[in-house]
Image (cartoon, rainbow, N blue to C red):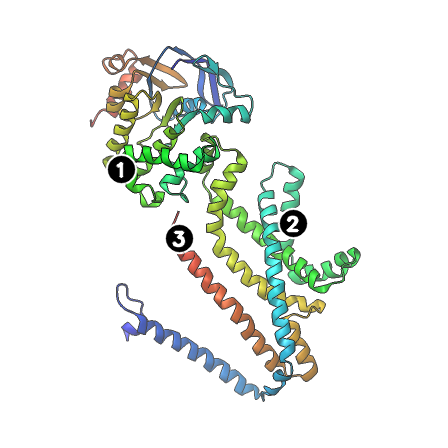
């Protein structure tokens, strides 16, 4: 029995891993099965078929929106991540306020304020664009912190050695600090992308036709709540699981270097 | 190399590390700083390297005062000197070869191909050619420090500054680094070295400065410092460090 549940060093434990994985999957399935049987819910999977186009479109929107937002949030993250150390004090305080405000308030509130106040006042009507901007602003604050942490993790001794070699501060960032920061924060950035995809589900409150909105619409029209939301969960997992695998892979790859 | 210090003062907060140090040396080839930890040797070296700015006084090298006025003039000055740190300070994301070529290409404007050739010649000469494509993490401490020295001399500096280059090394690697420094010295590379390796200091120095308590406690050629020094702070220090040698 011992050899079935323990990861024993220096031995081929593949069977034990398989056993434990299957055990936990079965356990989870059991819990769900028990829950659903108590509920006495009668699944009508036919309804989702009628809404498949809606779902697929929403899925595409979520993906596209997340990708645009990621690119934009990277730019914001670099700008405000470095800004927190800027000698230009107004810029430093802007960066600090931005990061603290966004990280300290619920995304839902940010979405509502941005949509009803800022976008409205600016005359922004394209909901997709508004969605991208909101998610970029939101995710940008987290990426700023990732980048700030990454830059700070590069030891003072390396800046010093670059200085002693006659590098300008810009060259030091370009050739010494950034290449190292990039490899160090790649895993966290991949994780941030996964969060971004999930968090964008909240955009359904301002009726952006993304993945979650498709489920909400179907639920509202047909009352097939679980038939709408279970595929929704599966759809998000389909995106986030590979990213989380990728994150682990990157972590392992870069832990050997440096 | 002519070195003049005029009333050089440096404090960190309430702590005065160098207190009005003055000195004038004509034509030294290898100058070695010894003395107790925290006594100011490294601070003096870092001032000479242009990495710190003095609170008062000036440093004149070969008739030219070091211009501490702006970061730009200091940068120009640093480009002409080589600096080796205690903890190697190689860039961990670059191979040994790229560590040497990066400053050549980016700071000194060498074409990439020529930088590579120069670096390979140096690595070859110091039996490091096999390590050229390895990253610092794959190298021993001694190899890292030798490559750091190659990086510092590749730019053909006016002189080389070494801050306790063997202090972070396992004892087995000390001699390979000291051998390399000795070799450079014998070829005419002018150097200023901070070290705790008394045997090496004695052998390699033209001139020794014993630094402690905020200033120069003793100075002279190695024989004078090591044999019956006048100041008992020096003899006490030497007794302690040479106890197990």
Q: Looking at the image, is B24 positioned above or below residue B188?
A: above
Residue A127, relative to residue B241: is it above or below?
below
Residue receiving disc 3: A255
Confirm or deny contact between disc 1 and disc 3 (CB under 8 A). no
Relative placement, left or right, of A79 versus B67 is right
In the rendering, at what x and y percent does residue B93 appear?
41, 45
Q: Chain of mark 2?
A: A
Residue B197 on image: x %, y %: 27, 26
**Residue A98 numbered mark, or none:** 2
Task: Using the image, name the chain to which the residue with label 1 belongs.
Answer: B
> Taking A148 as reference, is B63 above or below it?
above
| Residue pictured at 57% horizontal, 53% vertical | A143
Of labels 1 and 3, the one closer to you: 3
Q: Residue at x 48, y 66 (%)?
A: A242
Identify the element where label 2 is drawn.
Answer: helix
The CA distance from mark 2 to mark 1 is: 48 Å
* Label 2 or label 3, whichever comes before in sequence order: 2
- Where is residue A67, by image quadrant? bottom right
Q: Nearer the viewer, mark 2 or mark 3?
A: 3
Distance of mark 2 from mark 3, alpha carbons? 31 Å
């Amino acid at each position: 029995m011992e050899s079935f549940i323990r990861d024993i060093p220096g031995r081929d434990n593949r069977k034990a891993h398989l056993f434990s994985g299957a055990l936990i999957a079965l356990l989870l399935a059991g819990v769900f099965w028990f829950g659903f049987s108590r509920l006495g819910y009668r699944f009508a999977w036919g309804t989702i078929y009628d809404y498949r186009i809606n779902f697929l479109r929403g899925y595409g929107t979520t993906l596209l929106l997340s990708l645009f937002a990621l690119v934009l949030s990277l730019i914001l993250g670099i700008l405000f991540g470095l800004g927190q150390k800027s000698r230009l004090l107004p810029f430093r305080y802007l960066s600090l306020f931005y990061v603290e405000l966004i990280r300290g308030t619920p995304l839902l509130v940010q979405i509502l304020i941005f949509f009803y106040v800022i976008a409205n006042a600016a005359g922004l009507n394209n909901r997709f664009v508004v969605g991208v901007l909101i998610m970029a602003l939101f995710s940008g604050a987290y990426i700023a912190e990732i980048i700030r942490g990454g830059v700070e993790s590069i030891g003072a001794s390396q800046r010093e050695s670059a200085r002693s070699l006659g590098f300008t501060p810009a060259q030091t960032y370009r050739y010494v600090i950034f290449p190292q920061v990039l490899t160090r924060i790649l895993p966290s950035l991949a994780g941030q992308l996964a969060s971004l995809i999930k968090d964008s589900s909240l955009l359904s409150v301002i009726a952006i036709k993304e993945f979650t909105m498709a489920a909400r619409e179907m639920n509202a029209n047909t009352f097939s709540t679980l038939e709408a939301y279970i595929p929704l969960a599966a759809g998000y997992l389909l995106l986030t699981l590979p990213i989380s695998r990728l994150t682990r892979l990157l972590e392992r790859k870069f832990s050997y270097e440096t | 190399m002519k070195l003049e210090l005029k009333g050089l003062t440096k404090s960190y907060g309430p702590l005065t590390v160098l207190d009005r140090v003055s000195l004038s040396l004509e034509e030294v080839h290898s100058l070695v700083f010894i003395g107790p930890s925290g006594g100011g040797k490294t601070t003096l070296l870092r001032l000479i390297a242009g990495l710190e700015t003095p609170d008062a006084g000036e440093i004149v090298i070969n008739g030219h005062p070091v211009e501490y006025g702006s970061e730009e003039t200091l940068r120009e000055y640093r480009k002409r000197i080589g600096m080796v740190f205690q903890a190697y300070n190689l860039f961990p994301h670059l191979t040994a070869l790229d560590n040497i070529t990066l400053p050549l290409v980016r700071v000194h404007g060498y074409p990439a191909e020529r930088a590579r050739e120069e670096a390979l010649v140096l690595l070859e000469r110091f039996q490091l050619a096999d390590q050229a494509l390895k990253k610092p993490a794959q190298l021993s401490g001694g190899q890292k420090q030798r490559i750091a020295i190659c990086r510092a001399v590749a730019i053909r500096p006016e002189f080389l500054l070494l801050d306790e280059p063997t202090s972070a090394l396992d004892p087995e690697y000390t001699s390979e680094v000291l051998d390399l420094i000795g070799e450079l010295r014998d070829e005419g590379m002018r150097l200023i070295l901070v070290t705790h390796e008394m045997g090496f200091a004695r052998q390699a120095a033209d001139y020794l400065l014993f630094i402690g308590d905020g200033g120069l406690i003793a100075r002279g050629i190695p024989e004078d410092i090591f044999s019956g020094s006048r100041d008992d702070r020096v003899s006490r220090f030497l007794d302690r460090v040479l106890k197990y040698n």
